[in-house]
Image: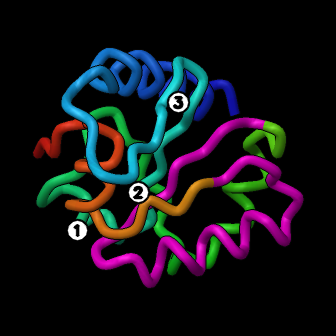
Amino acid sequence: MKKILAIIALAFAATFALAACAPAADPITVGADTIVIDVRTPAEYSEGHLDGAVNIDVQDPNFGTILSQLPTDGEYVVYCRSGNRSAQAVEIMKASGFTNVTDAGGVSDASSKTGIAIVQ
């Protein structure tokens, strides 16, 4: 769990540093404590993801177990390829007691809305 939290802490720093980029039509504010989660497969994630995002595959059988290690009162921004899996993940998270989860849709939309660059 400490390893996951350390990874998330690093993601915070990178995400916060890039959040000041140009705003989009429906901006999503990404603060220092916001965790950005890419719910695509690891292969998709490696092809390009938001800088600082944590990859937690919603299709992984351990998705619920991984979520249970995260604080439910944290602030989360979730995205995928097109918006379908992110919507599913957000519903799972809300049903699991997460109270501050934003669906940023697909990776391109998420980048535009948050101002975070897509990196490989």
Task: Residue 90: say if magenta.
Answer: yes
**Contact, mark 2 vs mark 1 (Cβ under 8 Å):** yes
Q: Which residue is found at the position 45% from the left and 65% from the top?
A: 39
The residue under label 1 is 44
**Contact, mark 1 vs mark 3 (Cβ under 8 Å):** no
The disc, 2 or 3, on the residue closer to the chain's N-terminal end is 3
Q: Residues within 10 Å of mark 3 (few under 14, many from 20)?
A: many
**Residue 8 image label:** 3
Quadrant placement of the N terminus: top right
In the rendered image, residue 81, in percent from the top left (x then y), is placed at: 28, 73
Up/down of 37 relative to 8, above or below: below
Q: Residues within 10 Å of mark 2 (few under 14, many from 20)?
A: many
Q: Of residues 31 and 12, which is closer to you in this image?
A: 31
Q: Of residues 26 and 119, which is closer to you in this image?
A: 26
* Residue type, mark 1 in image: Glu
Q: Which residue is found at the position 33% from the left and 21% from the top?
A: 14
The residue under label 2 is 38
Task: Residue 61: say if magenta.
Answer: no
In the picture, residue 74 is in which quadrant? top right
